Amino acid sequence: MNKKLMFLQWGLVLLAALSMVWLLAGMVKLLQFQSVNSFIADPTVTEQTPDYPQAWYARAIAEATAGDINAAREAYTTSMLNAEPAMLASSYFNRGNLNFREAIGSISDHGGHISLVELAKQDYRMALRLNPDLWDARHNLELALRLVPEDPTLDGFFEKDFISEQLSIESKAFKVELP
């Protein structure tokens, strides 16, 4: 009987030790999430961005609000790493908006805005691929297509179907006599 009690005692000690390790790991994770949440609440407090997609997304919004478009673009791109699909679609949409706004601000006769509009169209299409119900991305893609239309003659995907003479069926005229 003493062996059973000894075994039960060591089992309880092991269970208590594992519980403490699990509790400490949970506390560390809670502290990390609290630091990320405090960063998201005010990203301008520190230059160091936690390595979480949500933190980089918050950094991108703060940089865009401050007017630093290049830093916001980089932060949106970094937020796309390991992001959930909903946030990924939103990141593509917002990065497309940055490119589109910059393109509209730099419209000139030299056509320097075209590359930014093309980047915006790519981002809007990726956002729509991830979330087809994102109507704002559809609307902005339509605006970008109106600003810089795509020429169907240059792209191989837009080839018109033609009817071969060998495959076409000729209709013969016939006369219907009514009584």
Image (tube, helix red, strand yellow):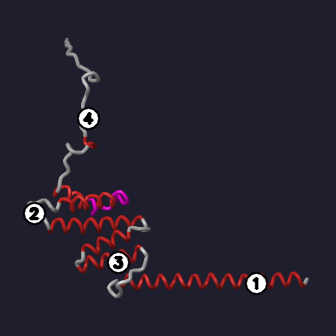
Q: Amino acid at mark 2?
A: Ser
Q: Amino acid at mark 3?
A: Ala
Pointer 4 or 1: first along the chain: 1
Instruction: For mark 2, give the secondary structure.
Output: loop
Q: Amino acid at mark 1?
A: Leu
**Disc 2 designates what residue?**
108
Disc 3/disc 4 C-alpha distance (Å): 48 Å
Pointer 1 or 2: first along the chain: 1
**Disc 1 designates what residue?**
12
**Disc 4 designates what residue?**
161
Which residue occupies 24% across, 77% down? 68
Label 2, residues with CA under 10 Å away: few <14, some 14-19, many ≥20: few
Q: Nearer the viewer, residue 131 or 26?
A: 26
Which residue occupies 65% across, 85% down? 20
Looking at the picture, does residue 121 appear above or below residue 53? above
Q: State if disc 4 and disc 3 touch (CB < 8 Å).
A: no
Disc 3/disc 1 C-alpha distance (Å): 45 Å
Q: Nearer the viewer, residue 67 or 93?
A: 67
Q: Toward which corner of the image does residue 22 lie, by quadrant? A: bottom right
**Disc 3 designates what residue?**
58
State which region is magenta. 128-138
Question: What label sits on residue 46 in the rendered view?
Answer: none
Q: Toward which corner of the image does residue 122 lie, by quadrant? A: bottom left
Instruction: For mark 1, give the secondary structure.
Output: helix
